[in-house]
Structure formats: C-alpha cells, structure tokens
Amino acid sequence: MESLYFSPAVPPDVVLSRFEVCRTRDLDEARHWGERIFCANRLRSLDAKGSVNTRIYYRRLGGIGIGRMSYGGDISIDPGQLETFSLIQMPIRGQERIDFGEQRVLSDPTVASILNAHVPFVINHSNSTEKLIIRLDNNVLERHCQQHLGRSLRKDIEFQAAMPLDTPQGRRWMRMVGWLYDSLSADEGELPPILASQFEHTLVSMLLACQPNNYSAELMADEGPSIAPSFVKRVERYIEEHAHEPISIVDMAEYAGVSSRSLFTGFRRFRNTSPMLYLKEVRLRNVHEELQRQSPGGSTVTAVAFRWGFSHLGHFTTDYKRRFGESPSETLAR
C-alpha cells in the first residue's frame, strides 16, 4: 500500500534525490549514518540473513531536517529516547510498529507517527517500508510554541504519538509536507536565511495546529484580553511599569484592590499563568531587549540579570535559553 496523502509534484522516488547521504548493504554503516543524523541507536536485523539495502536522503535546514529513507530489510531500531529533538515519520509504503512501553502505534501510509523527545521507544521497520522523516530540534519547537502563546513553557511539548492522515487535519498536514518536499527537492542551492526561517515557521505552526498536544487547548482557545477583568489588566500594566523593582504578590493585590486569591484566580482563568510567572516573563523580555541593545564591553550578562531581579544566575540562564533559544551571552555577543 502506497500513500494516498503524500502527493508531491515530483515522483516519490525523485524526492530529495539530489541529497543522498547513504546507500549501503552494510548494517554497521547504516547504523553509523543513523547516529550521524539522529542519535546513538541499537540497529538490529530481524532477518536470519541479516541483509539490508539502506538508502537515506537528507537535507538540513536550520533547526529542521527533512529526509526520505528505507532500510531494505526487517530492522529493529532502539535509540532509547531522543534528547534534543522530536521525529515525525510518514511511511509512503510499507509499515512500522513503534512501541512506547505499553503503548503501540502501527504506522503506515494512512497513519504517521511522532516520536517525542524524552520518551523511550523501539521501532520495528518492515522490509518493504520507505518513509519520509522530519527532524525538529527541541529549541525550534519550543521557541515557536512560546511565540504563539506569548509566554514561557512550563512543560516539554508532547504530541499524540499517532497522526491519522485521513482526517481534515492530517490531509492539511500532508499537503504542506508535499509542498515542502517539492520546494527543497528542486532547490539544491543554499537557501537565504529569511526563506529557511519561513519554511521552519510554516512547518512548526502547521504541526502545532494539526496534531493534538499538551498545549492544544491553549493554542486553539480564543484570546482572553478582551474579557479579562479590569483588575487583571491593571496588574499587567503595573508589572510592565515596575518590573525593574522588587514586586511581591501582596504589592500587586493591594494595587489592584483585590485579594491575592482573586488575583491568582483571575490570572489562571484569563491568562493561563500566575502573576509571578507573568512578572518573570516580562523581566526575561526586558533582559533580552537590553542585551540586544548593549554595545561590546558595555555591560555583562550578570549585571543586566541582576538589574531585572534575577539573583540565581543558573536558573535565569536555563529560563532564558528555553524562552529565546540561545544563552544570554550569545545574545550579548551578537
């Protein structure tokens, strides 16, 4: 069975044909290329003869990588868990079985699979299978999700593992995938950064919209500012104007003329955050903007962080990198 949903302008066998990185009948070499593109893994042939005919086509584009691959044999792939990226797999023929502990996904041309970072899994790849793959770096996925939400993430993004492709959302996703593969198959030159960024943005935005995840409800919800109580808006303005000063929840509640409990409830219901997390978000944004404005030797990361109320530099650096996709020192060095 071949995919009815992947319909590129170029024939499937020509997709990314200019970007072949591996063609081998040696299992160890196939494992080596899997480690170069993805991560360390235990690759094992399930065929008594141990035969493979591996072909991998792959192109890197900023924080994403797109590819087409087949192992040409019955293979078990056990990488443990992905640490720094998520992986989307879309068979265009054949099938795979992916085991996540007690959960199992049978992936074929009608059902794609998403391998989330930090979730252990094992793939059983059948001999006749050929698949499209999209590798998404964690920092890219998090950065775009944060931009849509307008705040930092408190948990890793986790997608539903099975992606049915015969639904309106699945067909929408595959139309975008077909366009992306067509564009990147035909253009073998170095893409301008602005175009690479546009591909990246389109891909991640479509994934967040089409595939259920632990932020879907918030991403799909109507924005709340127009219906939020006036005291929530007053406290937001207060935070914006006084973020450089020591501010407590008591200060905010007194300014708004409500109880601390009402303030927490208002922010949780209408902003899906807490007043103190909102304050941290404003301070992070101000640090980011100030570091961007600094001239070489004008200041230090430590001085700017302290000025905006961050006394624990380890926690600050972690939060900053998660929010902006780079360390504060990298921002200062630009």
Image (cartoon, grey):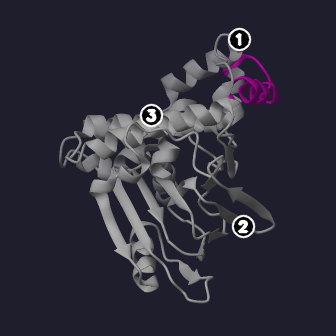
Camera-nearest residue between 317 and 218:
218
Mark 3 neighbour density, 10 Å: few (under 14) some (14–19) many (20 or more): few
Q: Nearer the viewer, residue 325 or 213?
A: 213
Mark 2 and mark 1: Cα distance apart in space: 44 Å
Amino acid type assigned to the residue bearing label 1 in the image? Ile
Lower sequence index among marks 3 and 2? 2
Q: Which residue is mark 2?
A: 99
Q: Mark 1 and mark 2 in contact (Cβ < 8 Å)?
A: no
Label 1: few (<14), some or many (≥20) within 10 Å? few
Front residue of this view, candidates 286 and 125: 125
* Residue 196 coordinates in the image, percent (x, y): 31, 40
Please check the rendered image and state whether residue 264 is part of the magenta-colored stretch, yes or no.
yes
Which residues are drawn in magenta?
Answer: 255-272
Q: What is the number of the mark on residue 227?
A: 1
Q: Report which residue position mark 3 lands on.
A: 202
Q: Position of residue 101 (x, y in %)?
A: 76, 69
> What's under tag 2, amino acid-wise?
Asp
Distance from the alpha carbon under mark 3 to that under mark 1: 30 Å
Disc nearest the viewer among 2 and 1 = 2
Figure check: 212 above or below 64? above
